[in-house]
Image (cartoon, rainbow, N blue to C red):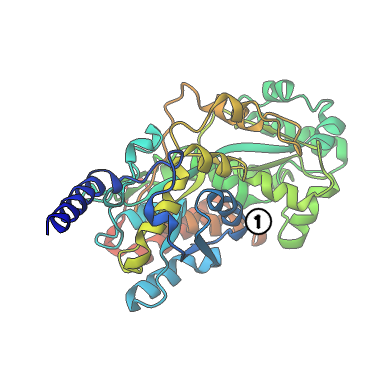
Amino acid sequence: MRMERLTCLFIAILSLSIIATGCRFNGVKGGSPSSGKDEVTITLWAYDKGVEDKINEEFNKIYPNIHVNVVLVNWSEYDNRFRLNLSTGTDVPDIVKVESYWWGDWLSMDGVFEDLTKYGIDPNNVSPAFADATTNSQGEFVILPAATGIACFWYNKAVARRYLGTDDPALLAERMKTWDDLLDIGETIKTKSGGKAYLFPDTMSIEELLVASDRSYLDGNVVRLKQKILPRFRFIETLLDRGYIAKLQDTKLERSYTEDNVLFYPYADWHATTIQNADKNGKGRWGVLAPPGGVFYRGGNGYAMPKKSRPENKKAAALRMNFALTRQGSEAIIHTHQFSAYKDAYSNGILNETDPYFNDLLTKKFYDWTVGRNVKPQFNPYSNIIEKELRMQAYYMMVDNIDASKAIENAIHEIRDRTGTGIRIGDDG
């Protein structure tokens, strides 16, 4: 009997110890928590399976018993498919990857996602830039930021040397201090190439960069497209009229990376992977520049845990999500050409790594662009609808030759139809 009492006392003390310490499993260096030792398979939805597979390789070095089944969901279908599965309660993934397009909208979906602090995930490990962009209207930490895109111009060094006389990033940066400076560069390329080389590949990439550069067009539920966005579309119209945009699509766009007829590809840091895949023999052929006027965010992603996901998998799912907010996880993200949202991601070691394909300290370059700048990502429940429509209208400018004013008028009409009373068009549009 005495031995049984001692055993019960020991179990009680052990239970209290687990309650006090076992619920915090956001670290990985001190050994795996008990949930990480259980054999379990979790499901993660992603629109970029290759990226998540690479991160999982590093995750499984620490948690080999947690198997992550990455389900590829097409980007264009992702939002609708998730909402459908959520409404029916069938095949709800343990983790959903949240792209920046949907971020603001999903944050407004009350009661859909778990409060991650209940699973030991500490929001204090998130970069301060994301402090206002992780919680829902109840103040719950429901989206874990994994990475954000650092807007940039990738450039073809051969095109730069041929038509601008240099591929030196410092000299090129001197020539493009303002957006209007790009017009001079475009004219130089057009003239020297006889109209066979171009400044940009298409209208959509430069439109998305221009919109991301300043999202003040949307204030709460008031959108001002004529005042804020029309001038940017008129800039695109000028680029088109002067013949500085190649109007490339699909396979022609993909082939352009090896054909040396486009100077700038205006995207973000994550576009490095696209370049490598499209120009497999292009080691050392590519450089990168900050946009005119300085850095801003373009794109990004995070993770969320649906409340309707399987209860037995939630602890393992939290471990996989929280991996992004650790040194090992953030380095895995950085190695997929993404800018980590973990506050302590940028050690001297990672900053001094030379990217073998680009032959450059890419991570340090992107990091240095952000130091000392109060740059924050911006998300709004209506951003998805508005920015998708703006992208479509930029596309119509390229293929149907509509002008900037018509594009904005079309966008206003479509946005009104899709948002109803949710969005109010400002007095000046």
Q: Which residue is mark 1?
A: 398
Q: Position of residue 424 (x, y in %)?
A: 30, 54
In the rendered structure, the answer to whether residue 176 lies left or right of residue 116 reads: right
Q: Residue at x 69, y 50 (%)?
A: 274
In the rendered structure, the answer to whether residue 104 lies left or right of residue 280 reads: left
Q: Quadrant of residue 261?
A: top right
Pick whichever, 308 or 62, lies toward us.
Answer: 62
Disc 1 crowd, CA 10 A, few/some/many (<14, 14-19, 20+): many
Q: Position of residue 313 (x, y in %)?
A: 38, 64
Pick whichever, 366 or 249, lies toward us.
Answer: 366
Q: Is residue 263 above or below residue 61?
A: above
Q: Residue at x 31, y 59 (%)?
A: 113
Residue 201 in view in this figure: no
User: How many numbered callouts?
Assistant: 1
Q: Residue at x 60, y 30 (%)?
A: 350
Name the amino acid type tagged 1: Met
Q: Quadrant of the N terminus?
A: bottom left
Q: Secondary structure at mark 1?
A: helix
In the rendered structure, the answer to whether residue 174 lies left or right of residue 341 reads: right
Q: Position of residue 252 (x, y in %)?
A: 78, 58
Q: Residue at x 46, y 31 (%)?
A: 344
Q: Quadrant of residue 422?
A: bottom left
Residue 91 in view in this figure: yes
